Image: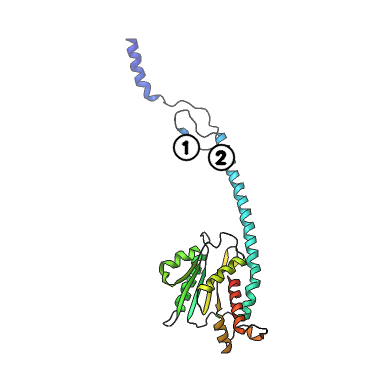
Amino acid sequence: MAMAAFRREGRRLAPLISPRPITAVRSSPLPPTQEDEGPIGVRYISTQVVRNRMKSVKNIQKITKAMKMVAASKLRAIQTKAENSRGLWQPFTALLGDNPSIDVKKSVIVTISSDKGLCGGINSTSVKISKALHKLNSGPEKENKYVVLGEKAKAQLIRDSKKDIELIITELQKNPLSYTQVSVVADDILKNVEFDALRIVFNKFHSVVSFLPTVSTILSPEVVEREAEAGGKLGDLDSYEIEGGETKSEILQNLAEFQFSCMK
């Protein structure tokens, strides 16, 4: 009788007893989570785990800082090259002039872009300006073609202007560009494309976060000679006299080719 009464009393008091045992005071400063409470009496996050995580974050910060320093060093080198190259093409612009509004029959728009993205609106801006030039210079007796440099401009122009693309050149930026490499590309374009005017669309470096969309016009030697004979203003070319065995046409051909390679 006594044992039966004891068992009945135990069943009556069982719901009032907490099923979770009292655990030790938490050593971690983090608030408890669902995972921390987990099984009864088990803690998943300890002070040592937090220390290890903080150490890994500091290591990642050091690696990121080193990568920033390497990127800044590369940017300074490329910026120096870009600024030094202006001494080549600016004198030719003054000598032969830049006539963006000249009316010719055959225009070739050279759109320069990058092979990779993650550079803001640089590539899309070049493509938009190229399309605007194509529309502006279109006409019943006019011919407009594209020469595309870079994967990003290729991907955008090939969708709606595939029939107007004369030449596509990509993967130029795998190695640092040099004048020799650019000269080969310029020679390839001049041999495969007929033009009266080349309109080069590119982004002129202004600062690390700012580029100025620029259009530079290069005329063929025939158009330069025709405009000079017609009394058109072509920069400071008329101020010089041509001497030597070469004719004026040959000199203009050499100047146009060199100007094109410098502009690119």
Within-10-Å neighbours for mark 1: few <14, some 14–19, many 20+: few
- State which tag comes first along the sequence, 2 or 1: 1
- Quarter of the picture containing the C terminus is bottom right
- Choose between 203 and 36: the one closer to the eye: 203
- Choose between 77 and 35: the one closer to the eye: 77
Question: Pointer 2: what residue?
Answer: 53
Within-10-Å neighbours for mark 2: few <14, some 14–19, many 20+: few
- Which of pointers 2 and 1 indicates the residue nearer the eye? 2
Decide: is 120 above or below 226: above
**Element type where label 2 sits in the image:** helix
- Give the mark count: 2
Percent x, y of residue 115: 52, 61
Instruction: Tell me the residue at 57%/65% (across/down).
Output: 210
**Which residue in the rendered view is the most extreme toward the bottom?**
230
Q: Is residue 208 left or right of residue 41?
A: right
Residue 212 appears in the picture as rendered? no
Mark number, residue 33: 1
Residue 254 appears in the picture as rendered? yes
Q: Is residue 37 left or right of residue 172?
A: left
Decide: is 47 above or below 74: above
Instruction: Tell me the residue at 46%/74% (across/down).
Output: 145
Q: Is residue 29 left or right of residue 237?
A: left
- Choose between 121 and 112: the one closer to the eye: 112
**Which residue in the rendered view is the most extreme toward the top?**
1
**Amino acid at the residue labelled 1:** Thr
**Element type where label 1 sits in the image:** loop
- Quarter of the picture containing the N terminus is top left
Percent x, y of residue 125: 50, 68
